[in-house]
Image (cartoon, rainbow, N blue to C red):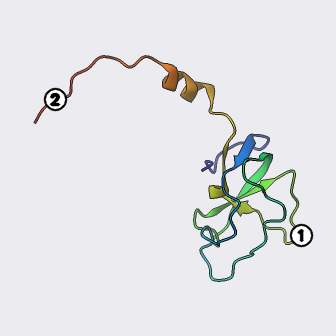
Amino acid sequence: MLSPFTAPGTKIVCVDDSSNFQHVASHDPVGRLDGLRKETVYTLAAIRRDANVKSGFEAYVEEIRRPSGVGFALERFRRLELPRAISALLDATPADFELERA
């Protein structure tokens, strides 16, 4: 899932295009995905709070303008690439250590 602090302009990828309403907190789901497709890359336009989504945030993408004016649940996306700092940590050689036994 994206962080609510992800900057606009970040390339993101859809990881969930299901329409089973699992991301909706209310009993009045929007229901349409207006062309959102899994494994498709999008450009993040904005992230806004929305109490009707379980995470509390919606993502708006530049490539899809929904007639209803609502975004997509933040849980439907992840960053296309990890930040360099995280990639560097993942690539680093782990230090040797021993676990302390209680």
Assign a secondary structure to mark 2: loop
Q: Specify the farthest residue to the left.
A: 102
Residue under the point 88% across and 60% down: 65
SS type, badge 1: loop
Q: Toward the viewer: 16 or 57?
A: 16
Q: Residue at x 62, y 33 (%)?
A: 82
Q: Which residue is mark 2?
A: 100
Count residues near mark 2 (Cα–Cα under 10 Å), then give few for <14, some for 14-19, many for 20+.
few
Dividing the picture into quarters, in which one does residue 76 lie? bottom right
Give left or right: position of 100 versus 32.
left
Q: Residue at 72% across / 42% down in the picture?
A: 7
In the picture, measured across the screen, residue 47 lies left or right of residue 88, that is right
On-image quarter of the C terminus: top left
The residue lying toward the viewer, choosing from 29 and 36, is 36
Q: Earlier in the sequence, mark 2 or mark 1?
A: 1
Badge 1: how crowded within 10 Å, few (<14), some, or many (20+)?
Answer: few
**To which quarter of the image does residue 17 belong?**
bottom right
Does 101 appear above or below 61? above
Cα distance between the residues tagged 2 and 1: 58 Å
- Say what amino acid the circle numbered 1 marks: Pro
- Judge whether 28 appears above or below 42 on screen: below
* Residue type for callout 2: Glu
> Which residue appears at 73% of the width and 61% of the height?
72
Instruction: From the top left corner, tell me how far across and down residue 63 is, in percent.
Output: 87, 51
Residue 12: percent from the left, percent from the top? 72, 44
The percent coordinates of residue 25 (x first, y second) are 59, 74
- Residue 89: give its label: none
The number of discs equals 2
Which of the numbered marks, if any, corresponds to residue 67?
1
How far across and how far down the image is residue 95, in percent? 34, 17
The correct choice, above or below, for 44 with respect to 91 in the image is below
